[in-house]
Amino acid sequence: MGSAKKILIVDDESSIRQMIAVALEMAGFHCLEADNAHLAHQIIIDQQPDMVLLDWMMPKMSGIELARRLRSDALTADIPIIMLTARDDEDHKVHGLEAGIDDYITKPFSPRELVARLKSVLRRVTPKGVDQIVEVDQLILDPISHRASAEGSTLDLGPTEYRLLQFFMTHQDRAYSRTQLLDMVWGGNVYVEERTVDVHIRRLRKALGERHEYLIQTVRGTGYRFSTQTQ
Amino acid sequence: MGSAKKILIVDDESSIRQMIAVALEMAGFHCLEADNAHLAHQIIIDQQPDMVLLDWMMPKMSGIELARRLRSDALTADIPIIMLTARDDEDHKVHGLEAGIDDYITKPFSPRELVARLKSVLRRVTPKGVDQIVEVDQLILDPISHRASAEGSTLDLGPTEYRLLQFFMTHQDRAYSRTQLLDMVWGGNVYVEERTVDVHIRRLRKALGERHEYLIQTVRGTGYRFSTQTQ
DNA sequence: CAAATTTGTGACAGAAATGTTACAACGCGA
DNA sequence: TCGCGTTGTAACATTTCTGTCACAAATTTG
């Protein structure tokens, strides 16, 4: 999915930064580091990372303080933040959420857990600009020209199939029930049979062809999911 | 899932209330009725229904007036409202939406449409708890993508196995009887043999593979337990 | 140790969910 | 109006899941 995401790690302990950086690099992310909030702020403005991992307690400016500043500036308000903290104090969680923290990880945590939560937040938060071209495994959807194409040739999609594909491509790695899909793709207050979704899924799969139909996965008993990850 | 939602139907014509009530009861909702806005207000404060279906035109206090009152009181401000109206006048729709109406249904409507829109509003309004990724010894369960994975590869779980695993991962280090598991994982009022649990435990263990099956421990004479600690 | 109890395991038929096809209704531009 | 593409639904096909049973293995009891 596009180029590697830039993740800024902010922690005053270099050993922790190292540990996290290694885990993230292995997972295919690109890491930036800062050992204090001021430097972090500068890097964020300068580099516009895709996410900030922020230690709660730091000398001078605390993580939570930095988070507030980021939120109050339009340029940085949309960058998701994950807080790292040694305390699992509920009060602090509440504070964090109030300040617009996207997730919360309590030390100690496993690198794997970190990566998993990080991906989850990226999925949830990255809204993908409405008019942005989306590409997944050679499958390209261009909202401007309102076309989807694979290997250069345009796919033959009906309007509904197109909307369905667009929705999926901008909401990957997440299972949706038929009802949710009806809500999101058909629009809130239409009432059509749930099974109608299956039929359109079928049509979309057919249009995607063997090369890409694996992207639409059925989640038995639940609904469907769009993901590059094989089941 | 949860108990039946309480829906208050407010309309001065009893035949309409009846019709709606029947449709909703069939869809599994619990209905309250009121034939005027005053009574409705009282019932709302008293019973705190999950939603109000409100007729636009009524003697004395109109539906729209009641809606305004409900919105202005913190106790009732969050209760979603669907307006029933005989007119499809755009102006009124605007008015309705301004007063915090969540949806709008023009008479005549089919029971099916009513139920569909009602569910849609309930879904939109009731925010689901934040589902967090759970990780135990390299075993990751992600409720969002509805996937469980170990070492990067997704486990092949049936719906029941998935629920069972999810339950265990969020209720570790505690022994549960077969009956309790049936209650929690299958849902209260199903009648299945207790031994069925054993079979699903078996299937889950198989899916977890040698690497992780130790997590599901048999507590002889009692039931099962999920724990990283070896017995 | 033998009997009794409890749990593990594989197989299987019925049930449930999903895949697939066909078709009638609808809207829309020619 | 006709023809065409699209859509929702029903009907049927296929796949997958579920609950039970019968028997094996393990553990406890006497």
Image (cartoon, coloured by chain):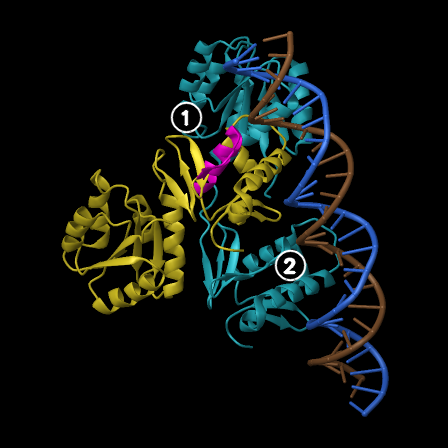
Chain colours: A yellow, B cyan, C blue, D brown
Instruction: Inspect the magenta stretch and tell me whether residue B94 lies in it.
Output: no
Q: Earlier in the sequence, mark 1 or mark 2?
A: 1
Indicate left or right for B153 with B163 as reference.
Answer: left
Q: Secondary structure at mark 2?
A: helix
Residue B81: x %, y % from top left: 50, 24
Q: Is residue A171 above or below residue B59?
A: below
Classify 10 Å Cα crowding around label 1: few (below 14), some (14-19), many (20 and above): few
Residue A118: x %, y % from top left: 36, 54
Residue bearing the label numbered 2: B180
**Residue positioned 34% across, 66% down in the render:** A108
Q: Is residue B11 above or below residue B213?
A: above
Which kind of residue does numbered mark 2 sit on? Gln
**Picture quadrant where residue C2 is located:** bottom right
Disc 1 versus disc 2: nearer the observer: 2
For the C terminus of chain B, which image quadrant? Answer: bottom right
Indicate left or right for A81 with A211 as reference.
Answer: left
Instruction: Inspect the magenta stretch and tell me whether residue A164 lies in it.
Output: yes
Q: Which mark is residue B219?
A: none
For the N terminus of chain B, which image quadrant? Answer: top right
Residue A80: x %, y % from top left: 30, 47
Residue bearing the label numbered 1: B73
Q: Which residues are magenta?
A: A153-171
